[in-house]
Image (spheres, coloured by chain):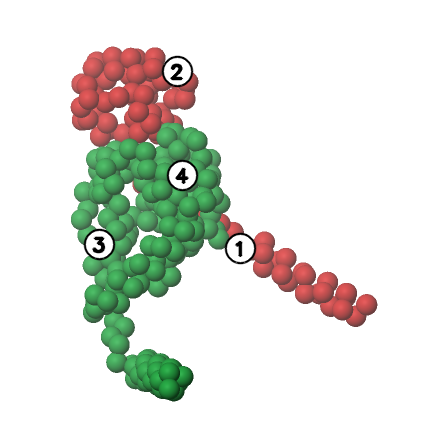
Chain colours: A green, B red
């Protein structure tokens, strides 16, 4: 009697699983999900994707070793010029509050000129930034800069990011202008 | 034997492709690179500046390298990377002179 109940329960669960999978497949192939970047995800999808992203980055970045001399002026100069060339379009610079990329990308790239982490020593943040710059983030518009840039150059950008929220537009201009002599920093 | 020679043939194009893949080169940006606006440093409040701060050191380094339209002698000493504490004092004095 009990085994009959268990069997019917298993059958019931199997039926539910088949219906869910079939429903998922129908939804997937129907093309009903809005894929345009101008239509935000629903809350559930956003939560799923955000949690997946954050957990994955936190796990992968945990082993990254931070160099001792992140607080050096040479790193600021080298990282600043690269930030201006490679990142400022999406992540902005002092005095700018939006760009075509911040308006159009979804999810919107974070504004790195804002001090949302309240400064100070934050090793997890440094590791996270290094990992993201090096490996990028799938389907977000953030490219992996690792294939064309060595670790030192990426750490220079991380060093610059640590000071970026404090910079005035004038300081930013001086630090990031390549002028004639930036090649020797790389 | 055949496989060995085949792998040699394959290795050459792979090597050529690998060598052609280069890092994003800062030199690419030099043609349209803007110069640092070191004159803007004059308008900054020097009394609030910490000359030992890496941001300040980096700006001095940059403006010394760029010559700052011939006024580098009044901005900084010969090298931006030696004794910065001393620089700080010198720079403060010179900037007070200027502004």
Q: Secondary structure at mark 1?
A: loop
- Tell which subunit mark 4 falls on: A
Tell me the element at label 4. helix
**Residue carrying label 1:** B21
Compared with B33, A52 (above or below) is below
A13 displayed left or right of A99 = right
Dot 4 corresponds to which residue?
A156
Secondary structure under the numbered disc 3 in the rendered image? loop
The label nearer to you, 1 versus 4, is 4
* Residue for point 34% across, 42% down: A125
Chain letter behind tag 1:
B
Question: Vertical placement of A61 versus B53: above or below?
Answer: below
Q: Which residue is mark 2?
A: B83
In the rendered image, the residue lying farthest to the front is: A1
Q: Which residue is mark 3?
A: A99
Q: Are marks 2 and 1 on the same chain?
A: yes
Q: Is residue A77 in view?
A: no
Q: Position of residue A153 (x, y in %)?
A: 44, 41
Q: Few, some or many C-alpha atoms within 10 Å of disc 1 (few <14, some 14-19, many ≥20)?
A: few
Quadrant including the N terminus of chain A? bottom left
Chain letter of the residue carrying label 3: A
Q: What count of labels does the image hold?
A: 4
């Amino acid at each position: 009697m009990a085994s009959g109940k268990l069997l019917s329960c298993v059958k019931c669960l199997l039926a539910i699983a088949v219906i869910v999978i079939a429903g998922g497949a129908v939804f997937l192939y129907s093309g009903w999900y809005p894929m345009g970047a101008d239509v935000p995800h629903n809350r559930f999808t956003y939560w799923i994707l955000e949690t997946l992203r954050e957990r994955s980055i936190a796990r992968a970045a945990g082993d990254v070793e931070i160099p001792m001399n992140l607080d050096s002026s040479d790193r600021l100069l080298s990282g600043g010029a690269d930030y201006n060339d490679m990142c400022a379009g999406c992540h902005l610079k002092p005095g700018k509050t939006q760009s075509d990329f911040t308006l159009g990308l979804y999810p919107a790239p974070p504004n790195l000129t804002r001090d949302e982490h309240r400064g100070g020593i934050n090793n997890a943040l440094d590791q996270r930034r290094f990992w993201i710059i090096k490996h990028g983030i799938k389907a977000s518009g953030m490219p992996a800069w690792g294939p064309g840039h060595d670790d030192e150059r990426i750490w220079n950008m991380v060093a610059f990011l640590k000071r970026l929220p404090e910079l005035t537009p004038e300081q930013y201009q001086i630090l990031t202008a390549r002028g004639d002599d930036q090649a020797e920093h790389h | 034997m055949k496989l060995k020679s085949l792998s040699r043939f394959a290795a050459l194009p792979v090597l050529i492709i690998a060598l052609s893949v280069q890092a994003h080169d800062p030199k690419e940006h030099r043609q349209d690179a803007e110069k640092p606006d070191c004159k803007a440093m004059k308008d900054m409040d020097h009394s609030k500046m910490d000359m030992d701060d890496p941001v300040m050191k980096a700006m001095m380094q940059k403006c010394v390298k760029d010559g700052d339209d011939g006024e580098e002698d009044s901005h900084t000493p010969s090298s931006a990377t030696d004794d910065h504490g001393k620089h700080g004092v010198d720079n403060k004095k010179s900037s007070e002179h200027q502004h």
